[in-house]
Structure formats: structure tokens, C-alpha cells
Amino acid sequence: MEKVLKAILSEAFSELPPRTRNLNRLLELGGITLPENMQAFVNAINLQSVPTRYPEDFTRLSKEID
């Protein structure tokens, strides 16, 4: 999702996207608003952006989302 948002920003503004992993910030910069249920999902995965770099945390997150 991060890469897709950065691609949208890059295309829209013809410049490199900011160096951030904050999905909400990327949505804001792109002027993108989401339906409430999708925003709730983004909020949940946004909190996990750093911990999911480690496999044991990814397994835990997968179980929480299921």
C-alpha cells in the first residue's frame, strides 16, 4: 500500500515522494479520502509498519487481522 501511494504522489507531482512510512500522511499529501471502513484498516496497518519488518511480528499481525 505504501508503494502504491508513493507511486500516485510521484506521478501526480512529478517528484520523489516523501521518505515516510506513515500511510495517513501519504493519503493526506495526495488529497485522498477513504470510506470510514477503509480508513480504519489503514489506521490499523499504519501502526504496524515498523514491527512487520520482523517475521515474528508479521505472524502475530496476520492472526489479529484474520
Image: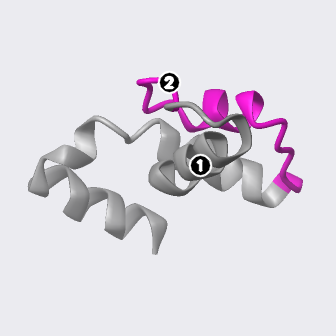
Residue positioned 50% across, 24% down in the render: 18
Above or below — where is 2 with respect to 61?
above
Q: Secondary structure at mark 2?
A: loop
- Bounds of the magenta segment: 17-36
Q: To which residue does mark 2 refer?
A: 18
Residue 3: x, y in percent? 46, 52
> In the displayed structure, does residue 64 sit left or right of residue 43?
left
Residue positioned 59% across, 41% down in the render: 10
Mark 1 closeness class: few <14, some 14–19, many ≥20 residues within 10 Å? some
> In the displayed structure, does residue 27 sit left or right of residue 51?
right
Q: Which corner quadrant of the image does residue 33 belong to?
A: top right
Residue 16: x, y in percent? 49, 31
Residue positioned 84% across, 52% down in the render: 34
Which of these two is toward me, 9 or 59?
9
**The residue under label 2 is which amino acid type?**
Pro
Q: What's the image's color scheme?
A: one colour
Q: Secondary structure at mark 1?
A: helix
Q: To which residue does mark 1 refer?
A: 5
Answer with mark 1 or mark 2, whichever residue precedes in sequence.
1
